[in-house]
Image: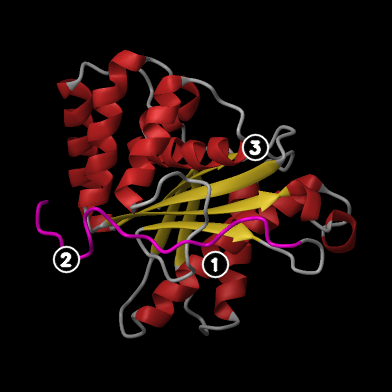
Amino acid sequence: MACDESGTHGAPHYGFGSLWLKWQRRGDFIADFRAILANHGFEEECKWSRATRAGYRPFYEELISYFFQRQWLAFHCLVIRKEIVRKDEFHKGDWDLARRKHFTMLLTTKIRKALQRFPDRIHEFRVYVDPIASRYDKADEAVEVISNNVLNNRFRARSPVKAVVTRDSKDTPAIQLCDLMLGAVMETWHRNSKNITKKFIRDCIAHHLGWDSLEYDTLPSERKFNIWYFHDPTREERKVESRKVALKYPYGYRGS
């Protein structure tokens, strides 16, 4: 899988995204991604921060449609409102530690569900992540070790996370697509963008989910595009509506 983070520099929310890709399909994905780039003459890195040019809307539309048509691609993210994080109580007063814990929580929760869904399969997970915003130089190694420790408490001696590797997003198309999806979700929740191309991308993703916008979180069981809002009922009323997804291309779609 490929992972990215957002909102680590003073935003009201921070979040982590994960693009899930079958290992056997990685070559197909890279070839298809490059073909879509070439088809539209797209020569920039595909990142949310750069998704501002109106002329590239057809590129973003095709890329998003491609994602939703492939059964072997999925996107899951975790969104945390900073105001409700019990930083002093659970994270030693340290935002760096809190973020690393939440990132690990996203990975272990999703991997645990995969192990439970297919208990007879041999599972190996390789995680490619954009450089983690942390003062700890070996943050990727720490995530790997802690993830396996958490999972081995439930699944003895499995150690399903084989590697957590920091990769430059410029050389990793899966991280770029993850960045685009996560940026669309986070910017919707921050309500801080007026760029019409970014609004087009957000609306395009929402359309494929059968939603009118990305201002919701999904049900926990959603497998294709999952938005997990981290809610602490002891500190706030729930501010986000959970909404069922109605995929434009449901599971079983044979168009790809």
Residue 31 placed where, x, y %?
A: 18, 37
Q: How is the image coloured?
A: secondary structure
Main SS, magenta region, reads loop
Name the residue beneath numbered marker 3: 7
Above/below status of 53 relative to 87: above
Report the side of 49 relative to 117 (left or right).
right
- Earlier sequence position, callout 3 versus callout 2: 3
State the image quarter where residue 118 is shown.
bottom left
Residue 250 located within the stretch drawn in magenta = yes
Question: Which residue occupies 47% across, 61% down?
Answer: 243
Q: Amino acid at mark 2?
A: Gly
Marker disc for residue 178: none
Callout 3: SS: loop
Callout 1: SS: helix
The reply to whether residue 51 is in sight is no
Marker disc for residue 252: 2
- Earlier sequence position, callout 2 versus callout 1: 1
State the image quarter where residue 232 is shown.
bottom right
Tell me the distance, in whole angstroms, between the alpha carbons under discs 3 and 2: 35 Å
Tell me the distance, in whole angstroms, between the alpha carbons under discs 1 and 3: 21 Å
Residue 84 placed where, x, y %?
A: 78, 55
